[in-house]
Image: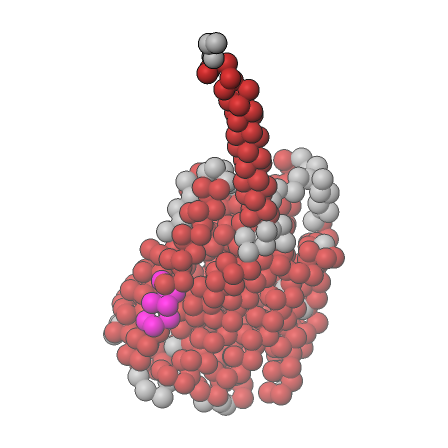
Amino acid sequence: MNFDKNFALEPFKKSTFGTSKFIIVSTANSIIENKTDVLQKTVFSILFSISFAHLLNDLIQAIIPSVYPILKQNYGLTFTQIGLITFAFQFSASILQPFIGYYTDKHPKPFSQVYGMLFSLLGIVCLAFADSFNWIILSVMLIGTGSAIFHPESARISNLASGGKRGLAQSIFQVGGNLGTALGPLLVALIVVPNSQKYILWFVIAAVIGLGIISKIAFWYRDHLILRNNKKGEFINFHSLSKSKVKFAIAVLLTLIFSKFFYSASLSTYYIFYVMDRFHLSIQQAQYHMFIYLFAYALGTILGGPLGDKFGRKYIIWFSVFGATPFALLLPYANLFYTDVLMIIIGVIISSAFPAIIVYAQELLPKKLGMVSGLFYGFAFGMGALGSALLGILADYTSIQFVYKICSFLPIIGAICYFLPNLKKK
């Protein structure tokens, strides 16, 4: 009897092939589900890492205004020159950001932040040894360039790691920067003021730590982009606004940025000089009062994003920008104790707006995350730069106390946020 082996094995082959096919399909579905879970999960380890990197980046930035009294004393600088230093730093930080964001929207660069931190590190070294106004300008522009490279891609990373909780993610990211800004004057008061300008070199340690953290984040960012098949892959919430209404809303937000950061320039750049002049404090004492304000500013940032997620970003923006008005108007007439109290209130209220403004803008233009983040960070730095320069000139012609009386009216402009549309999400 002839036995056909092929015939005998045919059912087994079919069964095996069918089983294999089933296993392959099941595995593929499992991979797709796991991939979706990964992409939609809030990655807190990355959010806190990028927040800490932001802390170190802004700590380096905060050195600049914190050493103004030392530079003014050492080189006989005027308030106009102080304003020009801030202008050079913030202009270099602002002008590049929209272009970097626009480019990385099309061509994401996971390791670009490493180069940004290297610019900042070089700026620290130059600032420590700067012995003239021109060298100081060059130093702060290097730090500003590093900041310009850092922010757009960092904002995108916080969005990608948000799991859809973008207000929370933006607050976590922002609070790192605010804490860094708050720690800057405190560390300068402890390390640099009692010694000399060259002790700024100690902040190289912060840059080196930042390089290590940013490098690890870059690998996660690169792998995340591969998971998304090189697509942007943000959590897009659609709205029903026309292009003209979107442009109008962007214009309103930029006006709010002008009001907020022009006023903030008077606080961040000249507050040390204000309390020294009005209350006859030493440089070191003034640095501690500056820390109180900056810590309050960081606290407000923590609150702004999650509250925007819960109650709506428009209402948080309205409360934050316009709500600081009565306290700002009282500030120039308060004694030292109530100046600290008012600065805490102003810091908490006015800082809660920025995470909400950034996320609101991202929701208006969800496919251009890098560009819109760069635009708003850049415009914020630009308004701070312009404000610092103009207020420095005004302080030289009048007095630092007169500057604070004039600036106290700026938050009133925040009433324009009444015209922001409510985003209707699908």
Q: Position of residue 250 (x, y in %)?
A: 60, 46
Q: Main secondary structure of the magenta part?
A: helix
Asked whether residue 210 is drawn in magenta, I would say yes
Estimate the x, y position of residue 207 in percent, counting from the top left.
35, 67
Quarter assignment of residue 424: top right
Q: How many discs appear?
A: 0
Residue 322, quarter of the rendered image? bottom right
Q: Residue at x 74, y 57 (%)?
A: 311
Frontmost residue, 8 versus 194: 8
Q: Is 236 positioned to the left or the right of 66 in the image?
A: right
Whether residue 282 can be seen here: yes
Residue 281 is covered by the magenta coloring: no
Extreme residue in the front direction: 1
Work out whether residue 25 can be spotted: no
141 lies above or below 33: below
The answer to whether 350 appears left or right of 4 in the picture is: right
Residue at the spot 65% in from the left edge and 78% down from the top edge: 342
Q: Nearer the viewer, residue 349 or 15?
A: 15
**Where residue 158 sits: x, y (%)?**
53, 54
The answer to which of 329 and 363 lies nearer the viewer is 363
Tell me where the magenta segment starts and ends, as one range.
204-211
Tell me the residue at 68%/57% (across/down).
308
Identify which residue is drawn at 58% across, 71% down.
297
Residue toward you, 221 or 395: 221
Q: How is the image coloured?
A: secondary structure
Tell me if residue 21 comes above or below residue 386 in the rendering.
above
Up the image or down, 357 lies above or below 191; here it is above
Looking at the rendering, in which quadrant would you find the C terminus?
Answer: top right
Relative to 219, say whether 58 is above or below: below
